[in-house]
Amino acid sequence: MREDRQVLIDVTNLKKYFPVKGSPFRQKQYVQAVESVTFSIYRGETLGIVGESGCGKSTMGRAVIRLHEPTSGRIVYDGTTIYDSETHTAVPMLPYRRKMQIIFQDPSASLDPRMTVGEIVGEALDIHHLCGSKAERRERINHLLDEVGLNTEHANRFPHEFSGGQQQRVGIARALAVN
């Protein structure tokens, strides 16, 4: 193993609790979804998280990229602290959305049924201002669809018109859109 490995993501004591709605008690109650998770991912490495259904894998992923705001802990991305409950650090995530993407387990639940596949894949291009013209945007969307094994005419279709595997490819194209 090389000694010059660089830490890309460092997560320390990550916790995520959700409030219990309609609790009959005066004191708020919480469900512990993620409890004291610590790990590091080094540049060039892949980390697999396994566990039984409902153990918090997806919630942990969402908390790391701050789709769910963590309850406590520390998250450092490439040397920059993006969340630290002790110092009350919580940086705006837009610049990091280009660097960290999540591909959801259930693609049908993560794709807006009112948007075409082209709109879904192109949304990230628009948010991050990655294309200078409509023609460049269309070309980039077509390239991304081709990269994941979908045809360019699929850009005009809606998610429900695809199989589960094809929907997953749309999610992958969406993640790849920001490079």
Image: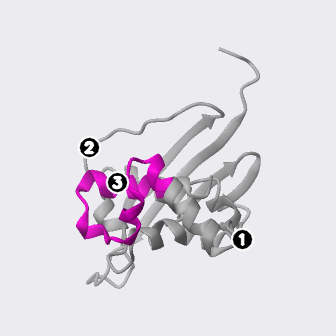
Tag 2's secondary structure? loop
Label 2 – label 3 distance at C-alpha: 21 Å
Which image quarter: residue 110?
bottom left
**Mark 3 = which residue?**
168
**Mark 2 = which residue?**
52
Q: In the rendered image, which quarter contains the N terminus?
A: top right
Residue in the picture at 62% in, 52% down:
179
Tag 1's secondary structure? loop
Q: Is residue 34 above or below residue 124?
A: above
Please indicate whether residue 90 sits to the left or right of residue 54 in the image. right
Q: Is residue 96 magenta?
A: no
Which image quarter: residue 170?
bottom left
Q: Earlier in the sequence, mark 1 or mark 2?
A: 2
Q: Nearer the viewer, mark 2 or mark 3?
A: 3
Name the foreground residue: 113 vs 52.
113
**Colour setup of the view:** one colour
What residue range appears in magenta? 144-173
